[in-house]
Amino acid sequence: MNAALPDLVTAKELAAHCHRSISTIYQWSNGSMPSPYPEPVRHNGRLIGWRREDIEATDRTQRISRRQYLYPNGI
């Protein structure tokens, strides 16, 4: 957790949280790949992080089972 800004998740923390590479996280943040998470917080155009409550809310609303992931149209 970022000690200076405890309510923000860094790119490295988000990568570990969602089991993706940091380069994927940066692609999500710059719009070159669609992101399941809301826009990150920026200051003077630089990426600062994502709001922890936004990450948690997205995780709650978009959680699916492994079966749903593997068989989105049912079996």
Image (spheres, rainbow, N blue to C red):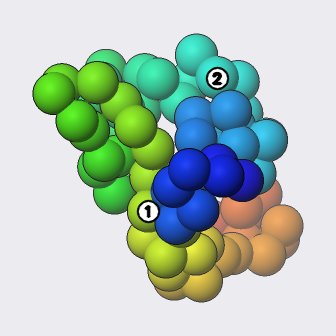
**Callout 2 environment at 10 Å: few (<14), some (14 to 19), or many (20+)?**
some
In-front residue for pair 68/64: 64
In-front residue for pair 43/36: 43
Left or right, 59 with respect to 50, comes to right
Residue 43 lies in quadrant: top left
Q: Which residue is drawn at 16% across and 27% down?
A: 44
Who comes first in sequence, dot 1 or dot 2? Answer: 2
| Residue type of the residue flagged with mark 2 | Ile
Between disc 1 and disc 2, the foreground one is 1
The residue under label 1 is: 51
Q: How far apart are the alpha carbons under marks 1 and 2?
A: 17 Å
Residue 8 to residue 30: above or below: below
In-front residue for pair 38/40: 40
Left or right, 24 with respect to 71, comes to left
Residue 51 lies in quadrant: bottom left
The residue under label 2 is: 22
